[in-house]
Amino acid sequence: MRLIINYISLALVIVAGSISCRSKSVSEKLSLSETDKYYSTISEKKGRNAAFVAMFDSSAVMLVGKSMPVEGIRHISEYLGRSSDSAYILTWMPLREFQSKSADLGYTYGTYLVRSKVSGDTLELGTYTTIWKKDKRGSWKAVLDTGNEGLK
């Protein structure tokens, strides 16, 4: 009888372990558009710089106006650190998403809005594209991001 209880206990431990190994990170559970919106929410609450550093892959590239591409998370972080994001709020909304058949690469595009933190006035409205890939944990990370002013 004790042997049966030991086998049942062992089986329960194995089953529980396999279930916990299957738990996914927040980003894994989200679609590509939902992931994009998630980082927009971080930008709204914590600032653009925090959101961008969180969403970019270590090898990411950021295309910025009047500058060479900014390559790698360290350089992106340095670039973002040169300008404060405390006077405005940047949010964006994906309009479409596309994924590869293997579901490990994709892109989103949409519109972004920059508002004054003080007045709430729209300072800038534009379009953006972000290319995403899944990292080793299965979370979506941005590998290339660019935006264009001009809708307002």
Image (cartoon, rainbow, N blue to C red):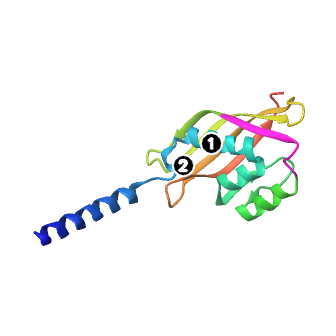
Answer with the quarter of the image where residue 117 lies. Answer: top right
Q: Which residue is mark 1?
A: 38
Tag of residue 27:
2
Tag 1: Cα neighbours inside 10 Å, few (<14), some, or many (≥20)?
some
Tag 2: Cα neighbours inside 10 Å, few (<14), some, or many (≥20)?
some
Element at label 1: helix
Answer with the quarter of the image where residue 6 lies. Answer: bottom left
Nearer to the camera, 53 or 152: 53
11 relative to 3, above or below = above
Nearer to the camera, 100 or 88: 88
- Residue 149 placement (x, y as % from top left): 82, 35
> Which residues lie in the magenta part?
84-93
Q: Which amino acid type is shown beneath numbered disc 1?
A: Tyr
Element at label 2: helix
Q: Is residue 32 magenta?
A: no
Q: Are marks 1 and 2 in contact (CB under 8 Å)?
A: yes
Q: Residue at x 69, y 45 (%)?
A: 42
Tag of residue 138:
none
37 relative to 48, above or below = above
Q: Residue at x 62, y 42 (%)?
A: 38
26 relative to 12, above or below = above
| Alpha carbon separation for disc pair 1 and 2 | 9 Å
Q: Which amino acid type is shown beneath numbered disc 2?
A: Ser
